[in-house]
Amino acid sequence: MSKLALRHLSCRFGSVTAVDDISLELASGEFVSLLGPSGCGKTTTLRLIAGFLPPSGGTVEMDGDPISSPASALPPEKRNMSMIFQSYAIWPNMTVAQNVAFGLEVRRLARAEIRARVGHILDVVRLAPFRDRYPAELSGGQQQRVALARAIVVQPAVLLLDEPLSNLDANLREEMRYEIRRLHDEFHITTVYVTHDQAEAMVTSDRIAVMNQGRIEQVDEPRALYARPRTRFVAGFIGRTNFLDGEVHGAEVVFDHFAIALARFDESPALRGKVAFSLRPQSIHLHRQPPAASERTCVIPGRVVQRAYLGEHWDYAVRPKDGELQLRVTARPHEVFEVNEHVWLEVDPGQMALLGSSIGT
Ligand SMILES: Nc1ncnc2c1ncn2[C@@H]1O[C@H](COP(=O)(O)OP(=O)(O)O)[C@@H](O)[C@H]1O
Ligand SMILES: [Mg+2]
């Protein structure tokens, strides 16, 4: 049985449908991100899970029991969930230890138990030396750790985080991603993490649900999401990519000024009419001489039209033959090509992800 389940969940504000028929199940101890651009409905989904908002349609279930439906909703304080907001609002007039102990005192735990739990969590989040400081005496990252400790110490059934790192500067944000994952590996609390930052989602999550305009477009493990995006939106939102629009003609898929044999595609029996693929820039290889024929790959002549050296890699724009299409290609620092140089592009159709909207059209 899933720990937390959203079933056909919707939420409307007047004429705006903020959450539009989403379904998602989390296994116990799973960490799932809701990833998408601003306004796509992430916070609203989290508030529906927490019980701060009633759904317009659908249900939220915990351990198989409905806790939210249009007819009735369990109040937030009875859900055994902890939520951390973007402005993490720790109490300025309480010390670190008092902030962390507060939720346990509210629950009337024994004094010794409170002391033990607070001590343990402060060790885990590396705040033990700061236990008697006030929030104003802490850095942004330390304050964020207090908020995390406070949310985790009550051992909630579900942890909800809404863009918890967005107030931190870039370096700290990167460090805290790993910190959040480390805490998860220690406590295994079922977690829903909201972010618009794909790297944050990829570092922290077991699975990522990509949201667009109130809907979930795809849910997958980070690697699958990157390698096999199923829609144009997902392919473009997770990392950079090339979109290849083609059309099936006889035994070939014809693109702009080049064609690839239909049989080379895994999905060849399903391909007909107009088709679209996503091809990552690092999945294309550049050669100065035509590479030897291979079973797997296709070779397309082209010309370099633009290049940029970014230290860790080269960023090339290459035009296959004389077409309009420009392909972005990422190459290693020693793979140096000049602008206007004639090159051969080596493409593996097995790495071209068929975009869903093109199936059956
Ligand atoms: N209380 C509200 N009243 C009216 N519209 C709202 C309310 N909350 C959110 N919305 C709208 O719902 C949509 C989704 O918002 P939100 O869930 O906050 O998105 P995100 O967190 O992904 O940025 C937006 O169009 C937003 O303007
Ligand atoms: Mg939001």
Image (cartoon, rainbow, N blue to C red):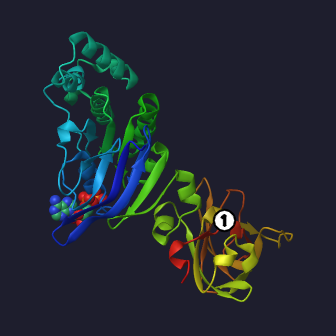
Element on which disc 1 rests: helix
* Residue situated furthest right in the rendering: 292
Q: Is residue 180 above or below residue 307?
A: above
Q: Quadrant of the N terminus?
A: top left
Q: Residue at x 66, y 65 (%)?
A: 351
Residue 55 shows in this picture: yes
Quadrant housing the C terminus: bottom right
Measuring from the top left, give residue 249's x and y in whole percent. 68, 89
Q: Position of residue 304 (x, y in %)?
A: 67, 75
Q: Quadrant of residue 176?
A: top left
User: Which residue in the protein does label 1 denote?
Assistant: 351
| Residue 299 locus on image (x, y percent) | 77, 75
Q: Residue furthest bottom?
A: 249
Q: Kindly indicate the quadrant of the structure image that contains residue 109.
A: top left
Amino acid type assigned to the residue bearing label 1 in the image: Gln
Tell me what residue is drawn at x 17 percent, y 51 percent: 72
Is ligand 1 closer than 8 angstroms to the Cβ of mark 1? no
- Does residue 167 appear to the left or right of 286 in the view shown? left
Instruction: Find the residue positioned furthest to the left.
Output: 93
